[in-house]
Image (tube, rainbow, N blue to C red):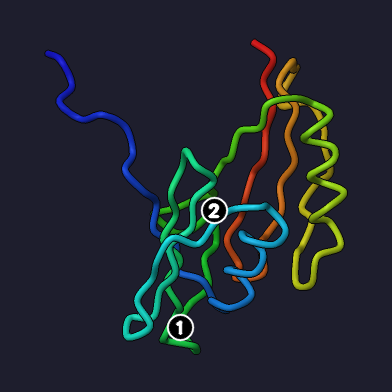
């Protein structure tokens, strides 16, 4: 059987602080905002290849995501073109307001892939990786 799908159109993330997440994606990662809906509220961002919709969490006292216990999104993984760019980006984002560093650049398993993991200001776990293969 041949798949009829053609990849992911966009990824939708519910975030705890839409303004902080938007600023992180646009100012720290260099993405572009290409739309949004203030009534929803949401913001649409892209790096020119991938698209992400950021939605403001409305149930403030609701449960937080536990990657070991909850079904659904475990993390969002972004790829990068070189190890130098990966390390440069880590330096740009590690001290960004409300960013939590889970781990700095390190080999993924036995390598050669290198990655780091953070929580962006809105609470979503982001992995950034470079794979030379």
- The vertical placement of 50 against 11, above or below, is above
Of callouts 1 and 2, the N-terminal one: 1
The residue at the point 50 percent across, 62 percent down is 33
Can you tell which mark lies on residue 62? 1
* Name of the residue lying farthest toward the left: 1
Q: Nearer the viewer, mark 1 or mark 2?
A: 1
Q: Quadrant of residue 122?
A: bottom right
The residue at the point 79 percent across, 44 percent down is 89
- The vertical placement of 132 against 124, above or below, is above
- The vertical placement of 62 against 9, above or below, is below
How packed mark 1 is, by other alpha carbons closer than 10 Å (few <14, some 14-19, many 20 or more), is few
How packed mark 2 is, by other alpha carbons closer than 10 Å (few <14, some 14-19, many 20 or more), is few
In the rendered image, the quadrant that contains the C terminus is: top right
Can you tell which mark lies on residue 8? none
Residue 46 rendering spot, x and y as whole percentages: 49, 51
In the rendered image, the quadrant that contains the N terminus is: top left
115 left or right of 10 in image: right
Q: Secondary structure at mark 1?
A: loop
Residue 106 rendering spot, x and y as whole percentages: 82, 32
Depth order, front residue of 54/49: 49
The residue at the point 79 percent across, 72 percent down is 97
- The vertical placement of 79 against 28, above or below, is above
Name the residue tied to disc 2.
68
The residue at the point 38 percent across, 71 percent down is 36
What number of labels is visible?
2
Depth order, front residue of 79/38: 38
Residue 51 rendering spot, x and y as whole percentages: 43, 49
């Amino acid at each position: 059987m041949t798949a009829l799908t053609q990849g992911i159109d966009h990824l939708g993330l519910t975030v705890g602080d839409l303004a902080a997440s938007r600023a992180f994606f646009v100012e720290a990662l260099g993405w572009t905002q290409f739309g949004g809906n203030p009534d929803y509220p949401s913001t649409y961002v892209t790096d020119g290849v991938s698209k992400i919709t950021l939605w403001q969490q409305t149930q403030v006292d609701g449960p937080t995501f536990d990657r070991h216990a909850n079904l659904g999104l475990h993390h969002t993984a972004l790829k990068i073109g070189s190890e130098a760019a990966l390390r440069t980006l880590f330096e740009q984002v590690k001290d960004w307001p409300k960013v939590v560093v889970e781990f700095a650049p390190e080999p993924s398993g036995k390598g050669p892939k290198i990655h780091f993991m953070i929580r962006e200001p809105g609470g979503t776990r982001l992995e950034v990786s470079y794979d030379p293969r």
